[in-house]
Image (spheres, helix red, strand yellow):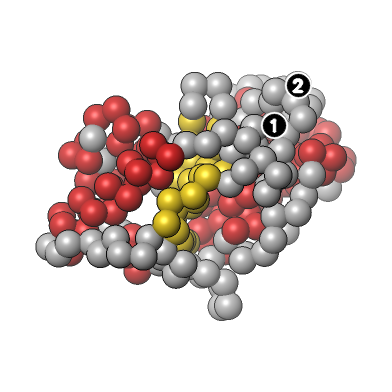
Amino acid sequence: MEKEIKNVFRGGNQDEVLSEAFRLTITRKDIQTLNNLNWLNDEIINFYMNLLMERSKEKGLPTVHAFNTFFFTKLKTAGYQAVKRWTKKVDIFSVDLLLVPIHLGVHWCLAVVDFRKKTITYYDSMGGINSEACRILLQYLKQESLDKKRKEFDTNGWSLLSKKSQEIPQQMNGSDCGMFACKYADCITKDKPINFTQQHMPYFRKRMAWEILHRKLL
């Protein structure tokens, strides 16, 4: 793995296509956002979210739908009408978990809707609280239910939570937020505790590059 990743992170044609799947194309330039302390771009995060969805088809794992990185910003700024067609071919109410990457200008976070536990939880590797994002997503579930199911979404018993900084691993630099959001999603979609640390990030970056190149999770 080490040698292969070194070659990819080295220079070369920035537009060379290194991986294709899920109607997404990953170039050398995209993969190199995983090198050192670069910020992950949308392409890398979207590809990884699709790999998590693929894995969720395995027996014994929770079923998952991941929205792309542009979804939440569009929903927040333009409202439900702007995104209602995004789920034309997907019944979001048929899965266990919804993953929503959230981009706050220069910071990546993650929101997770868990239909089994009736929770919407916000995960921020810098300890931020975002009740507004959770409320927007609950409102989205109501509108989506009316639009696609023609029935009211029962919000009875639902909780909106933001994880406190002492509850989840926190980043110790200004550039690993995208990695943290992806690795939170990785643990959550396996129903595993989130117990990695900042120290794991250099390895996780190489591992994610390998997973994207080979289109499968390790």
Q: Is residue 182 above or below residue 108?
A: below
Q: Residues within 10 Å of mark 1 (few under 14, many from 20)?
A: many
Q: Would you say 61 lies left or right of 34 here?
A: left
Is label 2 in a helix, a strand or a loop? loop
Drawn side of residue 203 relative to residue 89, left or right: right
**Mark 1 or 2 closer to N-term?**
2
Residue at 62% across / 65% down in the picture?
A: 190
Q: Which residue is mark 1?
A: 176
Q: Residue at x 71, y 38 (%)?
A: 170
Report the amino acid beneath label 2: Gly
Q: Nearer the viewer, mark 1 or mark 2?
A: 1
CB-based contact (under 8 Å), mark 1 and mark 2: no
Horizontal side of residue 175 vs 44, given as left or right: right
Which residue occupies 15% across, 55% down?
147
> Looking at the image, can residue 169 be seen?
yes
For residue 174, what is the image quadrant?
top right
Quadrant of the snapshot with the C terminus: bottom right
Residue situated in front as seen by the camera: 27 or 207: 207
Residue 66 x %, y %: 45, 51
Badge 2 crowding class, 10 Å Cα cut-off, few under 14, some 14 to 19, many 20 or more, is few
